[in-house]
Image (cartoon, helix red, strand yellow):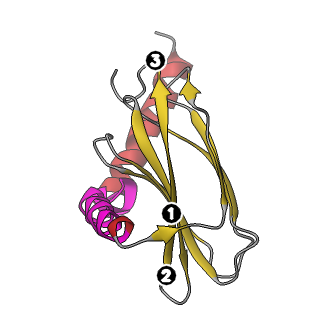
Amino acid sequence: MNRRLFLKGSLAATSVATAVSAGLLTPSAVFANTAKFKNQSNDIKKMIDDAEDGNFKFKAPEIAENGSVVPMTIDATNMSGVASVAFFVEKNKTPLAAQFDLPSANAFVGTRIKMGETSEVTAMVTTTNGKTYIKSRSIKVTLGGCGG
């Protein structure tokens, strides 16, 4: 091991140790709050049961060749008062794959989500007046994404 590499490694380790001891790298600040995320998944399951069929565009492939990067879009630009959009994958360990709050933004979202297996995917649009609209489709995954 050369001296320069050793000094760089020591400096990095010292910096991380200082940040941890100062409380700057607490688990809640560094990692996602999984308990809160799971509660949101349960809340969204209830919202889907009470939702109406949506008047928005939901694009996703019928067959995903790679479950770790499944592209999809929601285009709700024709709807007024969109507060948030979300993607819900029924058979994922954590069904809420993505949620975007759009209080005053254009209601068009494109993203890639991870799917562990073939599943029903629901796109959900929630408006500022509390109404929820959904569209669903089945997506076949040919190569695993969530540990598959």
Q: Which amino acid does label 3 sit on?
A: Leu
N-terminal label among 3 and 1: 1
- How many neighbours does mark 2 have within 10 angstroms: few (below 14), some (14-19), or many (20 or more)? some
Residue at 56% x, 20% y is 65
Q: Which amino acid does label 2 sit on?
A: Lys
Give the left or right position of residue 85, taking residue 26 as reference: right
- How many neighbours does mark 3 have within 10 angstroms: few (below 14), some (14-19), or many (20 or more)? some
Residue 148 found in image quarter? top left
On screen, residue 35 above or below 129: above
Q: Mark on residue 69?
A: none
Q: Tell me how far mark 3 sits from mark 1, CA to CA.
A: 27 Å
Determine whether the residue tagged by mark 3 lies in a helix, strand or loop: loop
**Disc 2 vs disc 1: Cβ atoms closer than 8 Å?**
no
Determine whether the residue tagged by mark 1 lies in a helix, strand or loop: strand
Determine whether the residue tagged by mark 2 lies in a helix, strand or loop: loop
Q: Mark 1 points at which residue?
A: 134
Q: Tell me how far mark 2 sits from mark 1, CA to CA.
A: 10 Å
Q: Tell me how far mark 3 sits from mark 2, CA to CA.
A: 36 Å
On screen, residue 82 above or below 128: above
Please report the bounds of the magenta region as a residue range.
Answer: 22-47
The picture places residue 90, in percent across and down from the top left corner, at 34, 46
Q: What residue type is labelled 1?
A: Ile
Q: Mark on residue 131?
A: 2
Q: Mark on residue 143?
A: 3
